[in-house]
Image: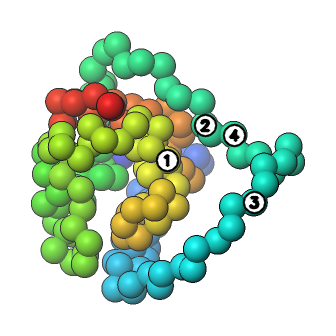
Amino acid sequence: MRSAPSNLTPRGGGQPLRLALASLLALGLAVAGCDQKPSPEPPRAKPEATADRAVKPHPPAPAPVEKASEQIKDTYQWYCAQCHGIHGKGDGINARLLTVLPRDHTKADYLETRTDEQLFQAIKSGGLAAGRAPCMPGWGHTLDDGAIHGLVRYIRELCNCEAS
């Protein structure tokens, strides 16, 4: 079995059991959340933008100039392949347990319509926060922004596409 990438082990000596338990807990919560259908929200009036309410988007990553590193590919295998599959086809071992199938990262038809920033936010904050499937957990508390940008670059490699 493959171990966690070295830069992602917990501080304090790297305790794989804690990481495994946390991963299982996250998966359990994701599966439990997928059984619920979100209730439609009534349309809301748009609030006026004010300086204290203005939301600043995360700065976009620099244009990818190199392929994803082996470390990023290992990160994908460790955190994403359980649902998205080892080749990114949406056929991971947990995919059959979900009511909303994981995205196939090898299909460009959908991924070309998403910006790198949209993919970044979906990985960082989770599917529901990005207006997508509630089954996708957010990884922003586990992965740093550099790793998430690397995952976006790797997803672009898998689909052989760029953002439109």
136 and 114: which one is in front?
A: 114
Q: Earlier in the sequence, mark 3 or mark 2?
A: 3
Residue at 24% x, 56% y is 103
Label 3 SS: loop
The label shown at residue 58 is 2
**Quadrant assignment for the C terminus:** top left
- Above/below status of 142 relative to 164: below
Q: Nearer the viewer, mark 1 or mark 4?
A: 4
Q: Nearer the viewer, mark 3 or mark 2?
A: 3
Q: Amino acid at mark 1?
A: Gln
Label 1 SS: helix
Mark 1 and mark 4: Cα distance apart in space? 13 Å
Label 4 SS: loop
Badge 4 is on which residue? 56
In the picture, measured across the screen, residue 55 lies left or right of residue 31, that is right
Q: Amino acid at mark 4?
A: Lys
- Above/below status of 136 relative to 36: above
Q: Nearer the viewer, mark 3 or mark 1?
A: 3
Mark 4 and mark 3: Cα distance apart in space? 16 Å
Residue 91 image point, x, y percent: 13, 60
Residue 42 visible in the current orientation: yes
| Marker count (numbered) | 4
The label shown at residue 121 is 1
Q: Earlier in the sequence, mark 2 or mark 1?
A: 2
50 and 94: which one is in front?
A: 50
Mark 3 and mark 1: Cα distance apart in space? 22 Å
In the picture, measured across the screen, residue 21 lies left or right of residue 125, that is left
Toward which corner of the image does residue 25 lie, by quadrant?
bottom left
Badge 2, how many Cα within 10 Å: few under 14, some, many 20+?
few
Asked if labels 1 and 2 touch by Cβ distance under 8 angstroms, the answer is yes
